[in-house]
Image (cartoon, helix red, strand yellow):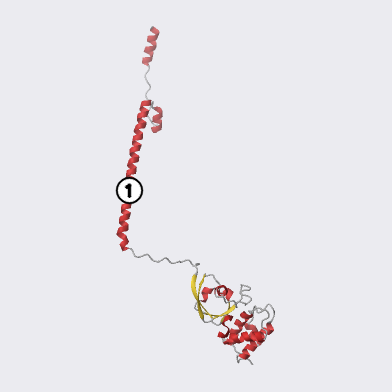
Amino acid sequence: MNAKKERKKGSSLVKPEKSSPRTGGVISDVANTKVSRRTLLKGTATAAAVVGVSSVAMRSMGLKEQATSSSTSSTYTLTNTATLPPPTPVVATSPTSARTITLNVNGTNYNVNVEPRSMLIDVLREDLNMIAAKRACNRMTCGSCTVLIDGVPHEACGVMAIRTVGHSIVTAEIGTGDQVVNALQQAWVTADGGQCAFCGPGNIMSATALLKANPNPSVADIKEALSSNLCRCGNYRAIIAAVQLAATNLGGGS
């Protein structure tokens, strides 16, 4: 009995330790706090209620903002539609898009839909079906694609079609429409100026420019005028003779 009293008495003398101040934040406080099951359930229910109320409030606020925004938007549209100018038509501004150009070929205007990069030789042959000019080297060295642009010989493979708008283009298809071209074509047959005839149209165009500028050319003049036109058959003597014959038939040769 005395021992039990002593133990009881001794335990009553032990002072409870003072709780240290909470410095670990919410998580530390919860960890250091003894929570009963009932307290935990009450806290969970309270938190759920708060979250539910908050979500409902946020949804209602969002609906109000949405309603205000749509109302404002509709008001803005209704207010400003009457004052807006009519929409302008959409126009293609791409520099690479195809466009319709007008080319004057052999005295006739042709409307052709081309790309800005299209070369004159391709437009003549593929779009206008004028195949007298030949695309042989495609690098402005053989002269087989020579045409006259404003009376000056040019290799059509090196000239963009869009650059020739507003200029006069003459090809061998003009035939009897041009007196000099017609005389040269006749002389080419008579003097056997072309063996394979592939280089013939280009040579005739260069010779046309020569005879219009110089009705009575010398052999040196003819060679100089045709120096950019190659003949793969090597028929240069007959070509020179054909040009001299055409000059004579036109009344300029000696």
| Residue displayed at 62% across by 88% down | 246
Task: Looking at this view, name the residue that lies furthest to the top.
Answer: 1
Vertical arrangement, residue 79 with respect to residue 46, above or below = below
Amino acid type, mark 1:
Glu
The quadrant of the picture occupied by the C terminus is bottom right
Residue 187: horizontal and vertical position, in percent?
64, 86
Does residue 238 appear anywhere in the picture? Answer: yes
Which residue corresponds to the image point at 34% horizontal and 39% vertical from the top-left?
A: 54
* Mark 1 lies on residue: 65
Where residue 12 sits in the image (x, y, percent)?
36, 15
Which quarter of the rendered picture does the N terminus lie within?
top left
Question: In which quarter of the view is residue 91 placed?
Answer: bottom left
Image position of 65 (left or right of 132): left
> With 192 as the anchor, is 49 left or right in this view?
left
Residue placed most toward the observer, 144 or 34: 144
For this view, does 179 lie left or right of residue 189?
left
Question: As displayed, is residue 84 above or below residue 128?
Answer: above
What is the x, y in percent for residue 198?
65, 78
Residue 175: give x, y in percent of width and height: 58, 83
Residue 96 vertical placement versus 201 (above, below): above
User: Can residue 220 be seen?
Assistant: no
Secondary structure at numbered mark 1: helix
